[in-house]
Image (cartoon, helix red, strand yellow):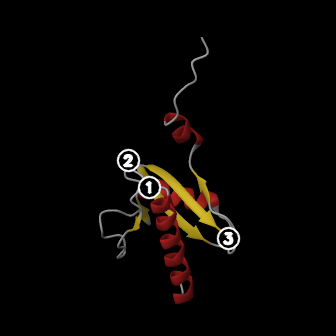
Amino acid sequence: MGKTSREKGKRGEREVAEILRSHGFPGRRTAQYCGNTGDASDVVGLDGYHIEVKRCETIRIMDWLEQAEQEANGDVPLVVFRKSRGKWYAVLAFEAFLARQRPVDTT
Protein backbone atom coordinates (compact mmCIF):
# COMPACT_ATOMS: atom_id res chain seq x y z
CA MET A 1 0.00 0.00 0.00
CA GLY A 2 1.37 3.38 -0.98
CA LYS A 3 1.82 6.37 1.29
CA THR A 4 -1.15 8.23 -0.24
CA SER A 5 -3.47 5.28 0.49
CA ARG A 6 -2.17 4.96 4.05
CA GLU A 7 -2.74 8.66 4.68
CA LYS A 8 -6.27 8.45 3.24
CA GLY A 9 -6.94 5.51 5.57
CA LYS A 10 -5.64 7.42 8.60
CA ARG A 11 -7.84 10.41 7.74
CA GLY A 12 -10.83 8.09 7.50
CA GLU A 13 -10.05 6.56 10.89
CA ARG A 14 -9.76 10.04 12.44
CA GLU A 15 -13.09 11.03 10.86
CA VAL A 16 -14.86 7.98 12.29
CA ALA A 17 -13.32 8.56 15.73
CA GLU A 18 -14.49 12.18 15.62
CA ILE A 19 -18.02 11.13 14.62
CA LEU A 20 -18.12 8.73 17.56
CA ARG A 21 -16.95 11.48 19.93
CA SER A 22 -19.54 13.91 18.55
CA HIS A 23 -22.21 11.36 19.51
CA GLY A 24 -20.88 10.90 23.05
CA PHE A 25 -18.70 7.81 22.55
CA PRO A 26 -14.99 7.79 23.49
CA GLY A 27 -13.82 7.23 19.89
CA ARG A 28 -10.11 7.16 19.08
CA ARG A 29 -7.76 5.60 16.56
CA THR A 30 -5.70 2.70 17.80
CA ALA A 31 -1.93 2.59 17.52
CA GLN A 32 -1.31 0.08 14.76
CA TYR A 33 2.11 -1.38 14.35
CA CYS A 34 1.70 -4.47 12.17
CA GLY A 35 -1.10 -5.76 14.40
CA ASN A 36 1.14 -6.07 17.47
CA THR A 37 -0.88 -3.76 19.73
CA GLY A 38 -3.32 -6.32 21.12
CA ASP A 39 -6.27 -4.52 19.53
CA ALA A 40 -6.54 -4.85 15.78
CA SER A 41 -9.50 -2.44 15.50
CA ASP A 42 -8.87 0.69 13.46
CA VAL A 43 -10.99 2.71 15.88
CA VAL A 44 -12.23 1.95 19.39
CA GLY A 45 -15.09 3.55 21.26
CA LEU A 46 -18.06 1.21 20.92
CA ASP A 47 -17.87 -1.51 23.57
CA GLY A 48 -18.15 -4.99 22.12
CA TYR A 49 -17.46 -3.94 18.52
CA HIS A 50 -14.38 -4.46 16.38
CA ILE A 51 -14.40 -1.45 14.04
CA GLU A 52 -12.72 -1.74 10.66
CA VAL A 53 -12.62 1.58 8.74
CA LYS A 54 -12.29 1.72 4.95
CA ARG A 55 -11.95 4.72 2.62
CA CYS A 56 -12.02 3.15 -0.83
CA GLU A 57 -13.56 3.88 -4.19
CA THR A 58 -14.00 0.17 -4.89
CA ILE A 59 -16.44 -1.36 -2.41
CA ARG A 60 -15.39 -4.85 -1.28
CA ILE A 61 -17.72 -5.41 1.66
CA MET A 62 -17.31 -9.19 1.86
CA ASP A 63 -13.50 -8.92 1.89
CA TRP A 64 -13.66 -6.25 4.58
CA LEU A 65 -16.13 -8.24 6.69
CA GLU A 66 -13.91 -11.31 6.46
CA GLN A 67 -10.95 -9.25 7.65
CA ALA A 68 -12.97 -7.80 10.53
CA GLU A 69 -14.28 -11.26 11.49
CA GLN A 70 -10.76 -12.69 11.56
CA GLU A 71 -9.52 -9.85 13.77
CA ALA A 72 -12.60 -9.38 16.01
CA ASN A 73 -11.39 -11.58 18.88
CA GLY A 74 -14.91 -12.15 20.24
CA ASP A 75 -16.26 -8.68 19.46
CA VAL A 76 -18.90 -7.94 16.84
CA PRO A 77 -17.17 -7.19 13.52
CA LEU A 78 -18.31 -3.80 12.21
CA VAL A 79 -17.12 -2.30 8.92
CA VAL A 80 -17.49 1.48 8.53
CA PHE A 81 -16.78 2.77 5.03
CA ARG A 82 -17.26 5.54 2.52
CA LYS A 83 -16.17 6.65 -0.91
CA SER A 84 -14.59 10.06 -1.44
CA ARG A 85 -17.12 12.82 -0.79
CA GLY A 86 -19.70 10.18 0.18
CA LYS A 87 -21.44 9.49 3.44
CA TRP A 88 -20.35 6.90 5.96
CA TYR A 89 -22.04 3.50 6.13
CA ALA A 90 -21.79 0.72 8.69
CA VAL A 91 -22.16 -3.00 7.93
CA LEU A 92 -22.37 -5.94 10.30
CA ALA A 93 -23.83 -9.45 10.22
CA PHE A 94 -27.62 -9.37 10.52
CA GLU A 95 -27.49 -11.93 13.35
CA ALA A 96 -25.14 -9.64 15.30
CA PHE A 97 -27.51 -6.73 14.76
CA LEU A 98 -30.53 -8.76 15.92
CA ALA A 99 -28.67 -10.04 18.99
CA ARG A 100 -28.30 -6.43 20.19
CA GLN A 101 -31.97 -5.51 19.71
CA ARG A 102 -34.81 -5.90 22.18
CA PRO A 103 -37.82 -7.76 20.83
CA VAL A 104 -41.12 -5.86 20.69
CA ASP A 105 -43.76 -7.13 23.09
CA THR A 106 -46.73 -8.02 20.87
CA THR A 107 -49.04 -9.24 23.65
- Number of marks in the image? 3
Location of the C terminus by quadrant is top right
Q: Label 2 to label 3, Cα distance in Å?
A: 28 Å
- Tag 2: residue type? Gly
Q: Position of residue 78 (x, y in %)?
A: 51, 54
Numbered circle sitting on residue 80: none
Q: Label 1 to label 3, Cα distance in Å?
A: 25 Å
Question: Image quadrant of residue 63?
Answer: bottom right
Q: Are marks 2 and 3 in contact (CB under 8 Å)?
A: no
Q: Image point 49% across, 70% down: which residue?
A: 13
Mark 2: give few (<14), some (14-19) or many (20+) Cα within 10 Å. few
Please tell me whether mark 3 sits on a helix, a strand or a loop.
loop
| 36 versus 80 height, above or below | below
- Give the residue pinned by disc 1: 24
Please tell me whether mark 2 sits on a helix, a strand or a loop.
loop
Q: Position of residue 87 (x, y in %)?
A: 67, 64
Earlier-in-chain disc, 1 versus 3: 1
Please tell me whether mark 1 sits on a helix, a strand or a loop.
loop
Numbered circle sitting on residue 74: 2
Q: Nearer the viewer, mark 1 or mark 3?
A: 1
Earlier-in-chain disc, 2 versus 1: 1
Q: Pick whichever, 54 or 12, lies toward us.
A: 12
